[in-house]
Image (cartoon, rainbow, N blue to C red):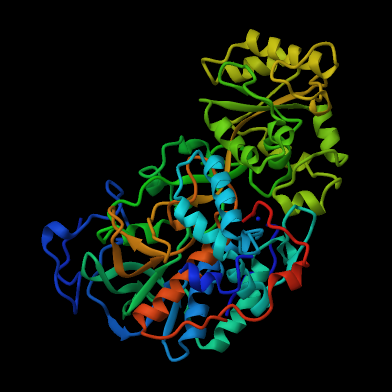
């Protein structure tokens, strides 16, 4: 089975978990009761939907199985494996539309709330979660997560031996700093359990008895044949819609021209399938990002390039807007020491009509000498700190880009930008940089209070500017669930047989990515979904010791305390 093995890249009590518990196609519901025309929803709204996601067709073959899990990242593996462990006779199918397993979990750093929280601890943590996310979250989900997360971590890291390492990032991460190592660990175990793993199998439509009852789904195999899987439960663990800007524009309220998407296969398929049901519209997508990058959506500099990292997100960076003025303290997250503000930076950049990263030859010399503060991710920052960056080759490649500007003086640089951006005022820009240089020299205070230690003067020609946007790891949100990870309608009524996991689910983030709502949420969603599936869809028993007998305290040490989760 294909996995990705190497990438550059991102207590309560033991029983706490258990206790905490368009096209009108006549064959659309083949083998099931037909819905009235008015009950059929149109997935995607105005989206062109070229792949017909959310519209069943006549199948080439039909199989009867017990559980279908869509996606093979953290959410997919956890749901499939926990169900199979607790219901060994069940036929569990895991579908992955790509030719390799893991999806975007391959790029995740990891990190989690590794221990169950007591009631008092959870209440305090949930309040902090709400504040960090502007209160536009579901506190009931966060409470369930915080009181049950330790059991989930025991299962993953203790029972199944996924290795985590403390690289000095504040939370232990997956070995190697990426989730590919986790996928490589779980894959042979999933195969040994007897999970039916199918690659190049793109799920595209649910099979409904009515809009509140899911009886299975359809997928296309590698040969383009449509296979219908009749099932007692379906788990949607398909990730976000970061890879599909044509769809995302209907679900986001930001300027997508500034969003430089990362990741693979995040096409919003799960969201569109859920919209077939009484859930209806899946809603706003949070853009999950840690820092800015340079370039545009259509022509990014490239996440893996050192120039993007250097010019996009350093405490010593200088950004100006469409008027040629700075608009915030670029070292803001350092000053606060809070991940909240670390993840707010992309939103600050998006608040401006245009944003430009300004640097000069002296900056490049420092970057090449290993003087920088932030890497591409926490792992990168920890293990590569002080290493020289490779800037020159990429710089030569981007000099002819229409988002890159150069001048022998600050005034010439401003004139180059102004020729492209009508609102850009050259005199304002020159005055802004002069004031910045004076603050860097200690001659006056910085207008935004930036510490002098993070202020590098801009005095060495040539001078450069690059349009800046946001390197988006993924989107987050959309599918509403309850604390059993059941998909629900707008009034909270559960859709029978349908569950969702991970970043596809709503209730975790608002406009700002708060951190810790990717891997930890996927793990928790899938574990609670598996419990409900085993007990209420398969009629089985879910063992109280399902998580195994290797607690996280034996891995992290008795003195370990939960920190703000990454992932």
Residue 436, located in which quarter of the rendered image?
top right
| Above-or-below relation of 59 to 316 | below
Q: Residue furthest top?
A: 427
**Residue 36 image point, x, y percent:** 11, 63
Residue 483 left/right relative to 473: left
**Residue sitting at x 24%, y 66%:** 212
**Residue 183 image point, x, y percent:** 61, 72
Residue 488, located in which quarter of the rendered image?
bottom left
Residue 299 left/right relative to 459: left
**Residue sitting at x 82%, y 19%:** 440
Q: Residue furthest front?
A: 120
**Residue sitting at x 74%, y 46%:** 375
Quarter of the image with the N terminus in it? bottom right
Residue 150 left/right relative to 283: right
| Above-or-below relation of 102 to 385 | below
**Residue 256 image point, x, y percent:** 46, 39
Q: Is residue 523 visible?
A: yes
Query: Between residues 30 and 561, which one lies in front from this camera angle?
Result: 561
**Residue 118 image point, x, y percent:** 60, 60
Quarter of the image with the C terminus in it? bottom right
Query: Between residues 94 and 341, which one lies in front from this camera angle?
Result: 341
| Above-or-below relation of 294 to 529 | above
């Amino acid at each position: 089975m294909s996995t990705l093995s190497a990438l550059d890249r991102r207590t309560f009590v033991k029983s706490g978990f258990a206790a905490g518990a368009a096209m009108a196609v006549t064959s659309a519901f083949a083998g099931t009761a037909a819905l009235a025309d008015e009950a059929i929803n149109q997935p995607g709204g105005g989206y062109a939907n070229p792949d017909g996601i959310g519209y069943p067709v006549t199948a080439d073959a039909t199989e009867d199985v017990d559980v279908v899990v869509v996606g093979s990242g953290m959410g997919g593996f956890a749901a499939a494996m926990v169900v199979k462990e607790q219901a060994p006779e069940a036929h569990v199918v895991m579908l992955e539309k790509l030719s390799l397993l893991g999806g975007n979990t391959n790029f995740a750093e990891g990190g989690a709330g590794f221990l169950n929280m007591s009631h008092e601890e959870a209440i305090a943590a949930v309040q902090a979660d709400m504040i960090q996310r502007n209160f536009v979250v579901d506190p009931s989900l966060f409470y369930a997560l915080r009181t049950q997360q330790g059991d989930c971590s025991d299962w993953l890291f203790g029972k199944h031996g996924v290795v985590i390492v403390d690289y000095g990032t504040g939370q232990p991460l997956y070995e190697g700093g990426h989730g590919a190592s986790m996928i490589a660990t779980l894959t042979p175990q999933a195969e040994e359990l007897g999970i039916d793993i199918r690659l190049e199998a793109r799920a595209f439509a649910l099979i409904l008895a009515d809009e509140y009852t899911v009886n299975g789904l359809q997928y296309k195999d590698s040969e383009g044949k449509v296979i219908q899987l009749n099932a007692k439960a379906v788990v949607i663990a398909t990730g976000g819609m970061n890879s599909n800007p044509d769809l995302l524009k209907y679900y986001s309220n930001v300027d997508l021209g500034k969003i430089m998407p990362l990741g693979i296969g995040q096409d919003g398929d799960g969201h569109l399938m859920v919209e077939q049901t009484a859930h209806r519209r899946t809603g706003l997508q949070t853009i999950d990002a840690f820092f800015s990058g340079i370039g545009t959506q259509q022509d990014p500099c490239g996440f893996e390039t050192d120039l993007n990292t250097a010019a996009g997100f350093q405490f010593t960076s200088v950004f100006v807007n469409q008027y040629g003025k700075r608009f915030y303290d670029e070292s803001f997250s350092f000053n606060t020491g809070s991940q909240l503000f670390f993840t707010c930076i992309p939103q600050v950049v998006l608040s401006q009509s245009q944003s430009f990263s300004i640097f000069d030859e002296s900056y490049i010399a420092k970057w090449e000498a290993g003087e920088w503060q932030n890497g591409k991710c926490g792992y990168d920052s920890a293990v590569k700190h002080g290493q020289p960056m490779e800037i020159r080759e990429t710089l030569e490649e981007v000099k002819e880009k229409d988002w890159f500007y150069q001048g022998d003086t600050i005034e010439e640089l401003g004139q180059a930008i102004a020729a492209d951006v009508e609102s850009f005022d050259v005199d304002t820009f020159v005055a802004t940089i002069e004031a910045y240089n004076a603050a860097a020299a200690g001659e006056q205070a910085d207008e935004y209070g930036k510490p002098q230690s993070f202020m590098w003067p801009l005095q060495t020609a040539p001078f450069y500017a690059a349009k800046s946007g946001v390197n988006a790891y993924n989107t987050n949100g959309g599918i509403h669930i309850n604390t059993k990870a059941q998909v629900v309608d707008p009034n909270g009524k559960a859709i029978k047989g349908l569950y969702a996991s991970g970043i596809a689910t709503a209730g975790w983030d608002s406009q700002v990515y708060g951190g810790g709502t990717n891997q930890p949420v996927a793990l928790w969603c899938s574990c609670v979904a598996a419990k409900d599936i085993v007990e209420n869809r398969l009629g089985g028993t879910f063992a109280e010791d399902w998580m195994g007998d290797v607690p996280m305290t034996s891995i992290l040490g008795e003195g370990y305390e939960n920190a703000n989760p990454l992932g």
